[in-house]
Amino acid sequence: MRRLLQGHATFRREYVAGAGALLQKLASEHQSPGALFVGCSDSRVVPELLTSSAPGELFVVRNIANAVPPLNHADASVGAALDYAIDVLHVEHVIVCGHYGCGGVNAVLSGHKKLARLPSLYEWLDHLAPAILGSRLEMVDPEEQWRAAVEANVVQQLANLSTFAAVRSRLDDGTLSLHGWVYDLHSGGVTVYDSVGERFIAAARAAEELSG
């Protein structure tokens, strides 16, 4: 804890001193982020860092395995953030970002039933199981299975987004775009889901297609 408090002192001394005008502007105006970023709670995946985003640019939700529970799920916390981001903040993009090496995904692949002694974690992982386990197909390499499961989980969360009326309405009128990303902890790179080709492609290629 001492290190964190010392880190805050460094933040005040080195960042706030140079960004005072920006922080005052953010504090005095209503927030207007351009995107909702749904990411994993993994401490190695930092949304603002991997997107080079400044304060105020991302509205962020993080949980185990970057999940978006469907509307009928008992946990409404992600849905509440989704409603707020879309209907109040009017974000134009929703990004669901998984990452290779996700422990939550691997727990499901390894048999999350053994986590029944941790009821909240077990319940959370259990609703992710159909998509993750369904991704295994005939793969025999555990690492490849894990990567495929991470990708399948992101695609399922994108599908879950459509269970919310606010999302469907904004998609229908063309004012909202959904994006599926997977972050690679080793390379620092991102792959982006191509819904037409039903595959993940390099971020650079996705950027070219968006600008083309």
Image (cartoon, rainbow, N blue to C red):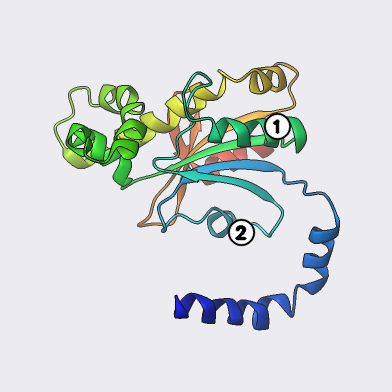
Say what amino acid the circle numbered 1 marks.
Ile
Residue that carries the numbered disc 2 in the rendered image: 52
Nearer the observer: mark 2 or 1; the answer is 1
Residue furthest out toward the left: 140
Say what amino acid the circle numbered 2 marks.
Ser
Q: Earlier in the sequence, mark 2 or mark 1?
A: 2
**Residue 91 percent coordinates (x, y):** 72, 37
**Residue 156 percent coordinates (x, y):** 43, 25
Q: Which residue is at the front of the view, 200 or 100?
A: 100
- Is residue 170 rendered to the left or right of residue 187? right
- Is residue 47 rendered to the left or right of residue 84? left
At horizontal 70% and vertical 32% (from top left) the residue drawn is: 86
Q: Which residue is at the front of the view, 79 or 174?
A: 79
Q: Which residue is at the front of the view, 39 or 119?
A: 119
At horizontal 51% and vertical 27% (from top left) the residue drawn is: 158
Callout 1: SS: helix
Observer able to see residue 92? yes
Q: CA distance from mark 2 to mark 1?
A: 22 Å
- Judge the density around disc 1: few (<14), some (14-19), many (≥20) Cα neighbours within 10 Å: some
**Residue 93 percent coordinates (x, y):** 66, 36
> What label sits on residue 86 in the rendered view?
1
Callout 2: SS: loop
| Residue 79 in which image quadrant | top right
At horizontal 46% and vertical 79% (from top left) the residue drawn is: 3
At horizontal 17% and vertical 23% (from top left) the residue drawn is: 138
> What label sits on residue 210 in the rendered view?
none
